[in-house]
Image: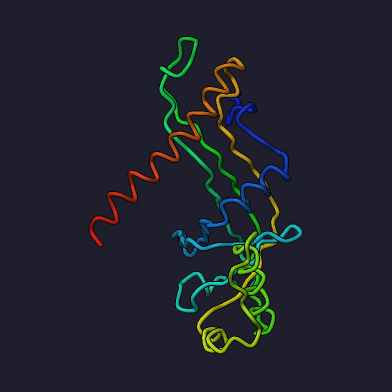
Amino acid sequence: MTNYPPQHHQDDNHEHMIEVIKTYPLATLISVRENQPLVSHLPLIYSEGKLIGHLDKNNPQAELLKDENDVTVIFSGPQCYISPSIYSTTQLPTWNYIMVHLKGTVKEIIDPLAIKQSMIDMTSFLEAPEHNYTLELDNPRMAQFISYVRGFEIDITHWEGKFKLSQDKQPKDMVSARNELIRANQESIVTLLDQVFQFY
């Protein structure tokens, strides 16, 4: 029987996965309707075994918030190509990454006040640690916005951490892979933004 995914690339520690969710809260939300996948990208906040968020009421996935439908959620951490040149031993090229795959059941949040509070909580979390902006409950723009969104929460039923970080290599090479992950992500962000923003 094939051992896949390799256990040394799996991380079952919920605290590790929660740290990924908190550090990279932009999630990929996947639902299935009539055998067709529906995909949205939106920030979600974690709270006591649940993910909480909201989406545009015109999004086709909004109709699937009822009846405790099943969903899959993916959080993507840092990732990059790993060249054999960084290792002290002979290796092949590979790709390192941190991903969290979650499954759960979703239900709609009906109470407008609860939706507003979830938006306040999300803003407070995303503004940390400086908290340069505070979203207030009586914010008039939020009062107008609330009729255009659907709030929801996902009860997490399955956790899977995919942490491919050269764990099968020698300690020295693992450190080199970690440093390359940091370097490549910093460099790729600058390169991408330089390319994208020259058109604006």
Quadrant containing the C terminus is bottom left
**Outermost residue to the left:** 199
Residue in the image at 54% along x and 86% along y: 147
> Going by the image, does 59 lie left or right of 173?
left
Q: In this view, does 173 lie above or below 66?
A: above
- Which of the 4 image quadrants contains residue 92? top left
Q: Where is residue 76 in the image (x, y as percent from the top left)?
A: 52, 47
Q: Residue furthest top?
A: 89
Seen at 63% across and 53% down, the residue is: 22
Classify residue 85 by image quadrant: top left
Where residue 118 sits, quadrant-wise, is: bottom right
Residue 173 x %, y %: 54, 18
Front residue of 93 and 157:
93
Q: In percent of the image, x 45 and y 19: which residue is there?
A: 86
Q: Whole-percent x and y of residue 77?
A: 54, 44
Q: Closest to the observer: 129 or 28? A: 129
